[in-house]
Image (spheres, rainbow, N blue to C red):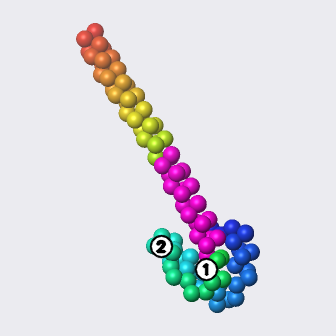
């Protein structure tokens, strides 16, 4: 995702520089490593974008972890309820059989 402030910086680049920036962003997202950038202007603009990508990725990872923990708690709670239900159901079935 590109933010408007990043786009404002990118608009100052030539078409060739913009193409280079786009390739650098793709490489960075795929590998996580900052590629060598020969053009100083592209390097500066990429720095802003890479910082935002890193912040977004960190926030995404934190959100995933929180959701994973919440789901795990929910499933653990459901397992406890299922055991109680099964145990309770089995006991009531036994009572019905013995009464009949």
**Residue projecting furthest to the bottom:** 16
Which is nearer the eye, 76 or 91? 76
Q: Position of residue 29 (x, y in %)?
A: 51, 71
Name which quarter of the figure residue 19 lies in.
Answer: bottom right
Q: Which residue is mark 2?
A: 33
Position of the C terminus, as image quadrant, is top left
Q: Is residue 57 magenta?
A: yes
Which is nearer the eye, 88 or 53? 53
Residue for point 37% across, 25% down: 85
Q: Looking at the image, is 38 positioned above or below residue 53?
A: below
In this picture, which residue range is highlighted in magenta?
A: 46-67
Which dot marks residue 13? none
Look at the magenta stretch and give its main secondary structure: helix
**Residue projecting furthest to the front:** 40
Q: Looking at the image, is 7 positioned above or below residue 85?
A: below
Q: Looking at the image, is 17 positioned above or below residue 77?
A: below
Sooner in the amino-acid sequence: mark 2 or mark 1: 2
The answer to whether residue 80 is seen in the rendering is yes
Residue for point 48% across, 49% down: 65
Residue for point 51% across, 75% down: 34
Name which quarter of the figure residue 37 lies in.
Answer: bottom right
- Drawn side of residue 72 relative to residue 60, left or right: left
Helix, strand or loop at mark 1: helix
Q: Position of residue 94 (x, y in %)?
A: 27, 16
Residue for point 43% across, 41% down: 72
Q: Is residue 37 magenta?
A: no
- Drawn side of residue 47 relative to residue 62, left or right: right
**Residue projecting furthest to the top:** 99
Q: Which residue is mark 1?
A: 43
Helix, strand or loop at mark 2: loop
Q: Determine crowd level at label 1: few under 14, some 14-19, many 20+ residues with C-alpha closer than 10 A.
A: some
């Amino acid at each position: 995702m590109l933010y408007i402030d990043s786009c404002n910086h990118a608009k100052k680049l030539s078409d060739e520089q913009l193409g280079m920036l786009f390739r650098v962003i793709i490489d960075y997202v795929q590998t996580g490593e900052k590629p060598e950038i020969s053009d100083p202007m592209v390097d500066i603009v990429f720095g802003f974008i890479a910082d935002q990508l890193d912040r977004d990725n960190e926030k995404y990872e934190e959100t995933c972890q929180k959701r994973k923990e919440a789901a795990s708690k929910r499933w653990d709670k459901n397992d406890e309820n299922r055991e109680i239900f099964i145990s309770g159901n089995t006991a009531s079935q036994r009572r019905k059989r013995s009464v009949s």
